[in-house]
Amino acid sequence: MNDVYRVVCSENPRLYPGKTFIDIYPAGSSRPENCLNHDCILMMRQVINPEVYSLESGILLHDKEGREPYLQYETTFNKRLKLYQDNFRKNYDKKILETFKKMKSLGRDKTMDVSFLDLAVRYDFFKSDYLTDTPKSAREQEIIQSTQEHKIREQKRQELIARKQNELENYRKRKNLSKAPTPEQMLAWKQAHILGD
């Protein structure tokens, strides 16, 4: 069995001095929510810690049965990027693996839980560029659709509340009620509403 995880290391020394966030998320295809790319994982972190930025892109962690977990980085042929990557590995590989082992010891398969709906609201998937561009993944399409459905349900709920408040106000005027209705009056109003009076 080979489990694969995406890893995102992020920070913002100005806002979070001395703190590096190491986020690990499943990359397997067995469940749609595991198919988030590195950018989505960074966005999830930004819901919790706004304005952090990624330090390195494309890190994968492989956890093969009977083997120590190991990290895989994007191959780069640029000398400057290769030097940066080597320096990054010296400083962070051990921390990433320690975070992974701690996560597994707690019986978890990811380091953070963020509602996909919160993520969609935060990054406003209703913006025109999200609606006109092709989604980057099936999960992103699912999030967009779920968010749109949630927005429609919320709008209908608000309309229903406003209509019921208006009906109650009209009832109160008809019955010359100047103060908040008693429970008995509310019951009478509900019964009248059901019977169509």
Image (spheres, rainbow, N blue to C red):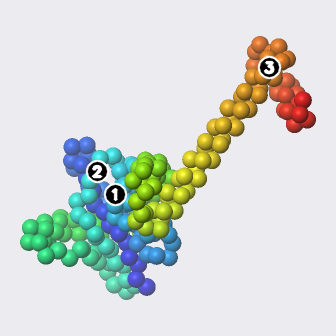
Q: Which callout, 3 or 1, points at the residue further toward the start of the chain?
A: 1
18 sits left or right of 24 in the view: left
For the C terminus, which image quadrant?
top right
Q: Position of residue 30 (x, y in %)?
A: 50, 76
Q: Is residue 132 visible?
A: yes
In screen coordinates, is 187 left or right of 74? right
Looking at the picture, does residue 18 appear above or below residue 139? above
Of residues 21 and 77, the one nearer the viewer is: 77
Assess disc 2: are there few (<14), some (14-19) or many (≥20) residues with their C-alpha within 10 Å of its C-alpha. many
Q: Which residue is mark 3?
A: 172
- Judge the density around disc 1: few (<14), some (14-19), many (≥20) Cα neighbours within 10 Å: many
Eyeballing the image, is 82 above or below 54?
Answer: below
* Callout 1 amino acid: Leu
172 w.r.t. 161: above or below: above
Callout 3 secondary element: helix
Q: Are marks 3 and 1 in contact (CB under 8 Å)?
A: no
Q: Amino acid at mark 2?
A: Val
The residue pinned by badge 1 equals: 42
Give whichever of 33, 70 is nearer the camera: 33
Query: Which mark is in front, 3 or 2?
Result: 3
What residue is pinned by disc 2? Answer: 52
Residue at (35% x, 51% y) in the render: 46
- Does the CB distance between marks 2 and 1 fall below 8 Å? yes
